[in-house]
């Protein structure tokens, strides 16, 4: 897999993303606080979101952001793992966390072909206290019937399957290469 260095938010941040991911803003409008990249060869996406800092302890904030992403379908979401993370190019004291969750669409939506069987969610949260900001990075991996081997995926047994294994490597590369070049992008205390 090859990666390209990408500028986010007009160059205020940089990161390396898989070369087969394209900037969605080239084809549709994206909110100013987001950068969205879509896999040209599949359904996976990578979303960067600059949000107001949630006034909660770090792990509670991580879960809060997950619930915000899945909205009303919290009961259809299963959190499998959460961990602290290190971002190689940010100050060492920067709190960062990751989680892996799956979100299952309703049986009705799946049967009508309107939704994937489930979506793997690899979330990273970077807490910038002084800037009153939470940076949320989300790698979404929809699993559509017929496009993956169901025997390869069993999160309860630690089996993510090839699509989620690839997405995990994308997330890890993001954590290694994510850099803030212009801190003036954020509100300062």
Image (cartoon, rainbow, N blue to C red):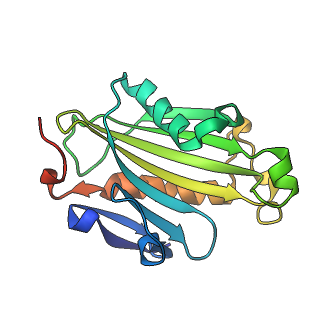
Q: Residue furthest right?
A: 111
Near-viewer residue (51 or 153): 51
Q: Is residue 160 above or below residue 22?
A: above
Residue 56 percent across, percent down from the top left: 37, 23
Res 15 quadrant in image:
bottom left
Res 77 quadrant in image:
top right
Q: Residue at x 74, y 49 (%)?
A: 153
Q: Residue at x 52, y 68 (%)?
A: 38
Q: Is residue 89 above or below residue 1?
A: above
Q: Is residue 120 left or right of residue 48?
A: right
Q: Residue at x 46, y 66 (%)?
A: 37
Q: Is residue 77 left or right of residue 152?
A: left
Residue 10 percent across, percent down from the top left: 24, 68
Q: Is residue 140 left or right of residue 148?
A: left
Residue 111 percent across, percent down from the top left: 88, 54
Residue 39 percent across, percent down from the top left: 55, 70
Near-viewer residue (154 or 6): 6
For the C terminus, the image quarter is top left
Label count reads: 0
Near-viewer residue (25 or 104): 25
Res 157 quadrant in image:
top right
Q: Residue at x 66, y 51 (%)?
A: 119
Q: Residue furthest top?
A: 57
């Amino acid at each position: 897999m090859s990666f390209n260095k990408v500028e986010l938010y007009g160059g205020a941040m940089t990161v390396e993303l898989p070369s087969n991911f394209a900037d969605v803003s080239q084809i549709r409008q994206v909110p100013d606080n987001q950068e969205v990249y879509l896999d040209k060869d599949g359904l996976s996406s990578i979303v960067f979101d600059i949000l107001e800092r949630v006034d909660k302890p770090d792990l509670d904030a991580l879960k809060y952001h997950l619930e915000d992403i899945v909205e009303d379908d919290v009961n259809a979401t299963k959190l499998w793992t959460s961990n602290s993370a290190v971002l190689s190019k940010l100050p060492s004291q920067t709190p960062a966390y990751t989680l892996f969750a799956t979100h299952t669409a309703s049986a009705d939506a799946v049967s009508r072909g309107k939704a994937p069987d489930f979506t793997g969610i690899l979330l990273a949260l970077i807490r910038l206290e002084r800037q009153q900001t939470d940076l949320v990075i989300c790698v979404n991996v929809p699993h559509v019937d017929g496009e993956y081997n169901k025997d390869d995926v069993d999160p309860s047994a630690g089996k993510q399957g090839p699509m989620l294994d690839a997405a995990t490597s994308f997330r890890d590369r993001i954590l290694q290469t994510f850099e803030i070049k212009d801190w003036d992008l954020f509100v300062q205390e």
